[in-house]
Image: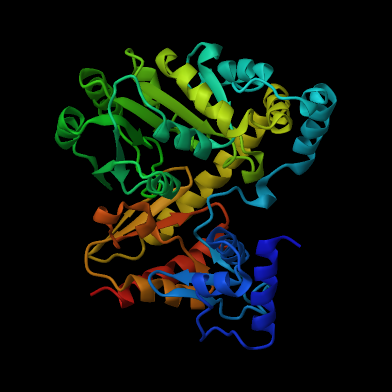
Amino acid sequence: MLKYEEVIEYIKNNINTGELSHSKRLPSIRSIQKLFQFSTGTVLKAYEKLEQDHIIYSVPKSGYYVVDNFHTQNSSKYPIIDFSAVNLNAEAFPYQNFQHCLNKSIDLYKEKLFTYSDPRGLNSLINVLSKHIQNYQIFTNPNNIIITSSSQQALNILSIMPFPNGKSNILVEQPTYYGMIKSLELNNIATLGINRDLNGINLDELEKLFKYGNIKFFYSIPRFHNPTGTSYSRLEKQEIVKLAHKYDVYIVEDDIAADLDINKKNDPMFSYDTSSKVIYLKSYSKILMPGLRVAALILPNLLIDKFLLYKKWTDMNSPILSQGALEIYIKNGMFDDHMKQLVSLYNSRMRCLKDTLLKYKHPRIQYNIPESGYFACIYVNGSLNYDKIFDSLNRKNIKMFNTSECFLKEYKCHNYFRITISEVNETQIIKNIPIVLDVIQKYLD
């Protein structure tokens, strides 16, 4: 049994014996660490796994608690309604097709499984991707594509490595992807923020930050932003790229939801870049499965050697088996077929969410519901008792992501509620979104 599994077993036993119940707070991370003499990371991993399995939930600034109706929540009577999950619902993934690709990958690349390979990634996959991403108006030399073990690895390396512009600060939208915030915090990277609300970004403020902020790169999610679900207009993207060229600032464009966009004329910032300032990042894990851990990064020539040096001594090379399976999945046309079905599914759920939300009007509550993508957003203009809202929703078996985690400490905000539609069907949306709104209104000052 692994160390973190010992902690999980201990918590479960305490729940089953009645020592821990919904009304009692779980032991703190520190107390469990002392009890087992394990590292903080091991205990955190155990608590995160328990949270993922909907056995416990966290309350900001309070701790962890047992989910109400834990013993019955997996029955049809008490299902968990998960508006927090970003990963693809297991029911929506064609396992048989991908299993075929995995088996074929083993046959094709079995020799490479026993040796170290090119840190750039599997060359045959890179060639397939260089053609496939042209569907997104991404045209690049295959030599500029690097395969990473997830987008998180790419972001981590980009954050810590030096850039040719000699600058040191990183600029992020506020709010932004939680994983980027944590990576910057853990690496002690000097970080600045710029507000991005439901109306977009202030370009005048962005220019001042580019000019005076010593910005190494600007991390941005232009399309279906996490967590607001908003997208930049074509003019905004063009202007941001112009400013990057003018002030020698790189842009890291995280295009997580490119495959889900039904607007084929919605081009990425990369397509407007004529001065090699845009670094393009595309993950395949979120639209297929998290365990795939494959992302594609397109780098300007000046950054390639330095990035590969850092990557080589991070993981030597990304897993060959996953890369080979993805290559076959795309070449056989399975990926495109899968995406057509997924886009239709998510588009339908977003329409349902929009219809449901617009029935409930409140002078201090705004919504952003895009046509597709993962994320929609509720914004509340007023003071909120955030902790009580999440506590109340958890008691009703409704799970939502704590969007305040998407902010740098100095920008902390408790007015956004991210809604994802990956794990909920239309019936669940229609029934439970009114409950979410009622709870928010109850604790709106």
Quadrant position of residue 124 = top right
In what quadrant of the picture does the N terminus appear?
A: bottom right
- Most extreme residue toward the right is 107
Establish if 11 lies above or below 319: below
Q: Residue at x 58, y 56 (%)?
A: 423
**Foreground of the two, 355 or 113:** 113
* Quarter occupied by residue 2: bottom right
Foreground: 423 or 410?
410
For the question of whether residue 75 can be seen, the reply is no
Is 179 on the left-hand or right-hand side of 125? left
Instruction: Let me know if residue 43 appears in the view.
Output: yes
- Residue at figure coordinates x 64%, y 28% from the top left: 317
Q: Which quadrant of the figure contains the C terminus?
A: bottom left
Residue 152 vs residue 242, the one in the foreground? 152
Q: Position of residue 430 (x, y in %)?
A: 49, 64
Total of numbered circles in the picture? 0
Image spot of residue 223 (x, y percent): 40, 36
The answer to which of 237 and 218 lies nearer the viewer is: 218
Asked if residue 194 lies left or right of residue 219, the reply is: left
User: Vertically, is 149 above or below 420?
Assistant: above
| 107 to the left or right of 341 | right
In the rendered structure, the answer to whether residue 354 lies left or right of residue 20 reads: left
Asked if residue 405 is positioned above or below residue 292 in the image, the reply reads below
Question: How far from the left and from the top, in percent, is residue 60?
Answer: 40, 69
> How does the figure colour the protein chain or chains?
rainbow
Q: Is residue 23 above or below residue 135?
A: below
Identify the residue at horizontal 53%, vertical 50% (top origin). Answer: 86
Task: Locate residue 174, reporting x and y percent.
Answer: 29, 47
